[in-house]
Amino acid sequence: MSESRTLRQRFVAWTVWPMLWKEFISLRRDRLTFALMTGLPAIQLLLFGYAIQTDVRKLPTVVLDESRSSESRALIQVLQNTDNFRVVASVPDRAQAKRWIERGAARVALVIPPDYMRNIKRGRTGQAQLLIDAADPQSSGAAISGAQLAAQARGAQLLATRTKLVPPVQIMVRPWYNPAQRSATFIVPGIVGILLTITMTLITSTAIVRERERGTLEQLIVTPIGKTSLMLGKLVPFVLVGYVQMSVVLALGKLFFRIPIEGSLSLLYALALVFIVASLGVGLFISTIARSQVQAMQLSFFFMLPNILLSGYIFPRAAMPEPAQWVGALLPLTWFLDILRGVLLKGVGIGDLWQELAVLTGSAVLLLVVSVRRFSKTLD
Amino acid sequence: MSATPLVHSPVVHTPVVHTVGLRKTFGALTAVDGLDLDIARGEVFGLLGPNGSGKTTCIRMLCGLVPPTSGTAMVAGFDVVTQTERVRHRIGYMSQRYGLYDELTVEENLKFYSRVYGLVGEEREARLAEHIDELGLRSRLTQMAGTLSGGWKQRLALACATAHRPDLVFLDEPTAGVDPAARRTFWQTIYDLASRGTTILVTTHYMDEAERCQRLAFLSRGHLIALGTPAEIVAHFGAASVEDVFIRLQEKDEQEQAAAGS
């Protein structure tokens, strides 16, 4: 099927335009796709921005204060000041405290024994007990660290008054990039990556499979349009859709979640293109395997799962077992998340992101070459 | 019936389809074996054969979708292997599934396909307007293609396949699943197109479609086994109808296949 090169290139130039024109009309009129494209960013933002808060605050706490002293009240105050606890009730005995936790009305019970103040006054260690509902490790972690923090703080105060000494060691913690430790600051940049993955795989693959189901692909391949224009016409509109989504999420994230934009936006948009191309490769690949739109959807969701779980979108990769980290490293999203958070939160430049860029470029080229070959074959 | 006027034909003596020893093998399987075929301008030509007879492979070679293993095929004066792009400009293709975009209007479907064939500017507008009137689609221009009835869809599909005035139009079982009235109007449009010099190549195994063709070619296991007008074919096989011939050939095919298999 050889024809002079220049002639073919001229065909590409004029045949890709009708494809783009048609594709944008279709995108506008296809309600499901349109809803997915506009609704998904909104839902993801609401869900992950507002509802899913991985930082645990204000655990409902009951207090059993048997000491009833100035010291015990000071301890309760210090504990509340950490903001990890919220005292909801005072209880008369241990059985009651246990009931509160069993009912789920309280997650933590603070027990201060009668001799608490006496021990402190006599120069011994004042001991208190914290009972934690540790079924959920994330909240119990917050309770444990809060308790330790409170004990240290109160201990240091008492020690200072008692001995007039300064603490011999002190670690000053400065949480950079997200000083308020807000989940949204961490999650919202990730939503950009997750959304692009969904759009490029789910929407692109179903759009291509739909053409095959309807017989329009069969129709188009006997026209002079050529495979190159056909693929460009199918893929380019989704690149633009991806950029629009990305801009919407960034704008809403800035407006409603006050996410910082420390670095260069143009750098971020440029790097996003490599990620978009890699994800389009996955979408095109799925379209060559799936026989129906439903199958394309299922395969896309199958691909989404490891992306959500293993990329570091919500769960820190450092906490994962090594094999899970290796799988995560194979996902383009993992590397793009580094770029997103790096540019937005830390304001790093290309000099610190060349490794991510290299990996993404490599996978984009590989995925696209493999998918385009497979797709070409399905057209023959 | 076979005497068709040759209106838009600059080269009268060149057939629109001309194949010599066309052959295609897939591994050990020979799909089409040494096909010699000439189809004249303005002919309504039927390509018949049971499933697996090589019809589809034959069409795909003529469209330049699969290269022949050996032999040559010229379509509209161009070689399907070395001048694929030019061939594609000169042919139209209407599949059973119509290949329409449901969410585009009738007009948008027509515009899209005419743009794909490179029609631009005033020339396109003028030609499209004429074409829309010829096919009686003017009253439906703003309707979504997805909401059209079967007959209208078929008419629109034909319009999309012929808006660029191709020399040759492939019709794949064109009237399957369409009511008799729409079928009659459709064939009338086909004859109109043919009378203006467009060659029509119909592949089908519906006998009423076959009998409307001016000439028929029967394919059986990759071989051309009969060629002529429907009347000639019926006479040649001493059968009662084209359908009779078809069934007889299919049975013979199955027997040979069984014999080859055992």
Image (spheres, rainbow, N blue to C red):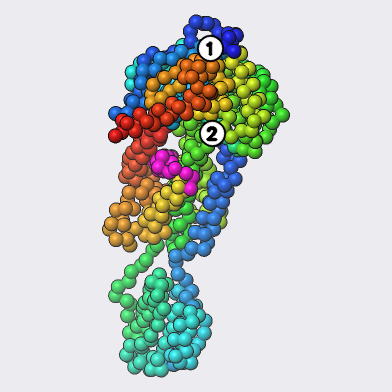
Name the one closer to the observer, A361 or A82. A361
Residue A56 placed where, x, y %? Answer: 45, 69
Q: Look at the numbered disc 1 and give the secondary structure of its residue.
A: loop
Query: Which amino acid lies under the numbered mark 2 shown in the image of this protein?
Result: Arg
Q: Is residue A57 magenta?
A: no
Q: Is residue B42 above or below residue B249?
A: above
Name the one closer to the observer, B147 or A1. B147
Q: Chain of mark 2?
A: B
Task: Tell me which residue sits at (45%, 50%) in the image.
Answer: A298
Image quadrant in which you'd find residue A349: top left
Q: Look at the numbered disc 2 and give the secondary structure of its residue.
A: loop
Q: Is residue B146 left or right of residue B226?
A: right
Task: Tell me which residue sits at (38%, 94%) in the image.
Answer: A115
On-image quarter of the N terminus of chain A: top left
Task: Tell me which residue sits at (50%, 26%) in the image.
Answer: B244
Q: Which is more N-terminal, label 1 or label 2?
A: 1
Would residue A380 be seen by someone viewing this image from the given angle? no
Q: Is residue A149 above or below residue A176?
A: below
Residue A122 placed where, x, y %? Answer: 34, 93
Find disc 2 in the rendering and name its residue: B97
Q: Residue furthest left?
A: A322
Query: Which amino acid lies under the numbered mark 1 shown in the image of this protein?
Result: Arg
Find disc 1 in the rendering and name its residue: B41
Q: Chain of mark 1?
A: B
Q: Kindly report the secondary structure that dominates the magenta region of the rendered protein.
A: helix
Would residue A86 be seen by someone viewing this image from the given angle? yes
Q: Which residues are magenta?
A: A273-294
Residue B182 placed where, x, y %? Answer: 65, 29
Q: Is residue B177 left or right of residue A199?
A: right
Q: Is residue B187 above or below residue A366?
A: above
Task: Tell me which residue sits at (53%, 29%) in the image.
Answer: B206
